Image (spheres, grey):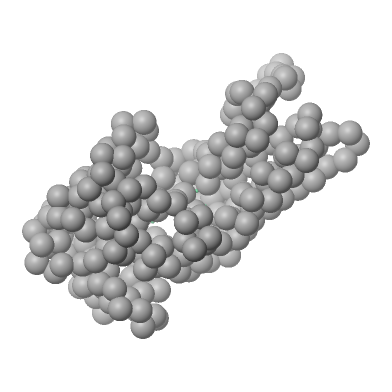
Amino acid sequence: MIRLAVTGAGGRMGREVVEAADGRDDVEVVLAVNRSDCDPVAGVAVDDAADFPTLLADRDPDVVVDFTGPESSVEYVAACAEAGVAAVVGTTGFDPEGEAALDDAAEEIPLLKAANFARGVAALRQAVREAVGALPGYDIEVTETHHNGKRDAPSGTANSILDDVEDVRSELTHRTHGREGEQPREEGEIGVHARRAGDVTGEHEVLVAGNHELLELTHRAESRGVFAEGALDAAMWTTGRDAGRYDFFDVINS
Ligand SMILES: NC(=O)C1=CN([C@@H]2O[C@H](COP(=O)(O)OP(=O)(O)OC[C@H]3O[C@@H](n4cnc5c(N)ncnc54)[C@H](OP(=O)(O)O)[C@@H]3O)[C@@H](O)[C@H]2O)C=CC1
Ligand SMILES: O=C(O)C1=N[C@H](C(=O)O)C[C@H](O)C1
């Protein structure tokens, strides 16, 4: 049984993580915090995020799961590094400075970060690597669709997929975000499209087209529960590890 802390417990994902933990017998939520006032979630009282460093020392969690925003995530992870508590980060939208701050923290604690904790997305990413490698010269367009409350675009998952594609197809050197006016497709480009509508949990589609054929690889998350369960599996895996950066493939391949 691990002792878990959850940040952003009043948010869509933080709430989902606390609820998922309530349904498991390998995790006990010993601390939940939120920036703004928040009613208890699954019977767990939610404390003021401003007290997070003190509460970390008092409640002594093994690991913190963070789904908030990039600015707050950097602060929470720094507090984890100070307290020697492992961190699992699902937050997306970090700039290079934010990533560097996470690197610094990972010198002190085990830090696992993933833009998507759905196992199906890990499989999608592997399938995409294989497909784009097998189809040299084919055009690639990545489209993601999310609910209208999402802040960052393109999604962290889309960025991971784009990194994968560029890794396999090194001649693809630039990302074209949408098109408007006279803008024919150019050599070396990957098209990227971000849609925001309604309450879509999260969809990622990779289109690979050329030579009179078209391959579509799509993942649709039907519930945030898949992300929460994956994050809790990651929290179990990360607890007790050496300091360093890890990702969700480490969990899946272990
Ligand atoms: N890795 C994965 O599998 C997934 C990742 N995500 C990512 O998780 C993150 C959160 O998504 P979601 O739950 O939908 O977002 P919500 O907007 O629903 O929740 C965000 C939470 O973070 C808190 N927060 C935001 N900014 C700050 C801040 N500056 N200081 C303190 N707390 C802050 C909010 O607090 P308050 O209530 O006070 O505003 C809220 O509790 C996003 O980056 C998203 O992309 C989402 C789903 C899956
Ligand atoms: O904000 C979301 O909701 C999601 N964000 C993640 C991302 O940016 O990739 C993962 C998931 O698609 C849901």
Q: Residue at x 31, y 64 (%)?
A: 239
* Residue that protrudes farthest toward the right in the picture: 212
Q: Is residue 162 above or below residue 78?
A: above
* Residue that protrudes farthest toward the bottom in the picture: 25
Q: Is residue 188 above or below residue 122?
A: above
Q: Quadrant of the N terminus?
A: bottom left
Left or right for 59, reference 148: left
Q: Residue at x 40, y 74 (%)?
A: 20
> In this rendering, does residue 83 appear at all?
yes
Question: Tag count in the figure?
Answer: 0
Quarter of the figure with residue 53: bottom left
Q: Is residue 9 above or below residue 195?
A: below
Give the image location of residue 39, x and y in percent.
24, 70
> In this rendering, does residue 76 appear at all?
no
Give the image location of residue 70, x and y in percent.
33, 42
Left or right for 127, reference 18: right
Give the image location of residue 244, x and y in percent.
33, 48
Quarter of the figure with residue 220: bottom right
Left or right for 176, reference 26: right
Left or right for 48, reference 143: left
* Residue that protrudes farthest toward the top in the picture: 182
Q: Residue at x 47, y 56 (%)?
A: 250
Give the image location of residue 119, x and y in percent.
56, 62
Q: Residue at x 31, y 31 (%)?
A: 97
Quarter of the figure with residue 62: bottom left
